Image (cartoon, coloured by chain):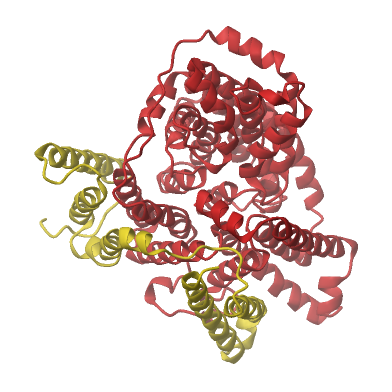
Amino acid sequence: MTELPRVQHIIASGLIAAVGVCIAYISYTQEPAQAFLFPRLISSVFAVLAIWTFGKAVLGKTKVGNGLNGTALKNMAPGLLVMIVYVFWAAKALGFYTATTITLIILISLYDPAPHTEAKSWIKRGVITAGVMVVLYLLFAQLLYVFTPREIFA
Amino acid sequence: MDFLFYMGDVFTPINFGLLVLGTIGGLILGATPGLSPTMAVALLIPFTFKLEPQQGLILLGAAYTSTVAGGAVSAILLKIPGAPANIATTLDGHTMAQKGEGAKALQLSFLASAVGGLFGVFLLIFLTPVLAQWALAFGWSHLFWLAILGVTVIGTLDSSSVVKGLLAGCIGLWLATIGFDDMLGAQRFIFHPSVSGGINIIPALIGLFAIPQVITMFAKGRTPLGAEVIEVKKHPIGDAMREVGRRKKALGIGTMVGSIIGLIPGVGGQIAGLVAYDQSKKASSESEKFGTGHSEGVIAAESANNAMVGPSLVPLLTLSIPGSPTAAVLLGGLLIHGIFPGPDLFTNYPQVVWPFINSMLFGQILMCIFGLYVAGLAASVARVPHSVMAAVVLALAVFGSYSVYNSMGDVYVMGALGLGMYFLERFGFSAAPLVLGLILGPIAEANFVQGAMTANATVGIFNFFFTGWLNILLIAIIVLSVSYSVWMELRQRRYTTKDDAVAKEEALS
């Protein structure tokens, strides 16, 4: 295993071990004890397995999981950022349909291999976004009667 | 023969319409690389929420059946398996297509899928009531061990690392305890208002299966799909039928291997196709032709993939233990309609379960008929660029998880679990045991707590949970499955170099 995935494995398994230990601590200290009977059982196994995994990562004996390489991280970063903003902020703040339209056009443009300088590719992206939005509106608003948060432009 | 009594329910206009819709939709979704059957069914669940339970399940069952078969289209015409289950189909299917026998390969694949699928559903029909009758004898301790068995079997068999598989199962079991305790109403692990009511299954399933795929597509960057669809020339269906008839051995091996693997919880279709292909090659008198566009390869792989669908539902419907990740998602679909699978399912909800099972029987035939006609369309859909696919799946995930309970909290839970799962996958964890833990956690806890209360008042915890032949049998199966997986992992490590393992993982991801 090269040095970078090893460090990544140590960080990832360390985080999981920390969560496992925290959960075990909470399970054994919170009251009423009866309500935490099952969590105690689970968290004990969780903590032991997580510490085992962490120990293996520290010793460099982790055999599965390739971690993240620089190219993949660089590729996914903009999409991930757009996704986080969309899911955790824009969908509620701007309204589902407004936020989804903006997200779709940004994501399709970001990852479309066609050149950004051609008008044709922008028209294609616009048409795809409009088509998907129409389908989403028909499915969720008209067919399933889902009441989404108020749109910012409504 | 109860199933015959409910046969007519499949043919009501709405039920049959949903069956056709699910079959055609499933074929197209299955052909789309990156959209696994599990993810397709997870994304479909919100659409079933407004339907009657019977109708919802028919739609989901049809989608499950046909997504597995649809994956063969892109495997044959593009050399990109629509789902991991179709990996073996690419070996001979794509070579046949390159030789100008694409139509024949597709016909063989759908015919073999239908034969395997029908056999699998008949197994489901005849095995389920027998097992359900037997499962009526189960008490609290047995149901607790069964739930733990479900998590450990999937955790150990579905993961490349036993410890990480079990750890993922524990994470799922812990996630299931978040919220208010059912017995005392105490708050547990509520660190954000979004999870005050606990983690809802459907948004969690969508997040765990769809979001990692979206991020994986992002990670590929601005790369073109790079796959040309091979043109399909006409081929008489009668010839394909005769060919399937001639290759009885491959068809039989595929069907049997798929059925047996389907019955083992956690093993799933990924390996059914590969094992059947391998066994068929060993048993064939023309083994040297495998890999060069031999029809037996396609027949064995595809009959196995679909034969596992029906049996994978046997442990789900009788014991609440899903046989595959997609069956776990179907369990989520049952739960949102207030239907709890178990030994009394066929007594309490025969009007829901039998039409669902019967619809899978007819779904196999429809899948074969439509598969031959929509293969061209499905292959075109398979060429949808990653950029569009990722954006559409993300939008569907957000709308779908919100629509179940009209709650933004569910959207946040979906996003957070999905993000976490992507990173966990990169470090060797698998979503299936985590999902099983999340689904089976409440069953395990309820039976553990009730069992513990009874035990304290009677024979004591140890005697209650660790004695009696059924408890010992279940514990022995858990120990055996873990030991077997550890042995397999150590054996594989001995014969595989680290570079091989890394290369294999890269190829799979």
Q: Locate residue A107, reporting x and y percent.
A: 25, 52
Q: In this view of the protein, can residue B124 be seen by the observer?
A: no
| For residue B163, above or below residue B312 | below
The vertical placement of B202 against B2, above or below, is below
Left or right: residue B488 versus residue A58 is right
Residue A37's place in the image compared with B312, above or below, is below
- At x 40% / y 56%, what residue is drawn? B211
Which chain comes out yellow in the rendered image? A
Task: Choose top left, top right, bottom left or bottom right for residue B283.
Answer: top right
Between B377 and B26, the residue placed more toward the observer is B377
Q: Residue at x 63, y 31 (%)?
A: B301
* Image position, residue B36 (x, y; %): 48, 44
Q: Position of residue B270 (x, y in %)?
A: 61, 43
Q: Is residue B311 left or right of residue B333?
A: right
Residue at position x 59%, y 13% in the image: B240
Q: Is residue A13 visible?
A: yes
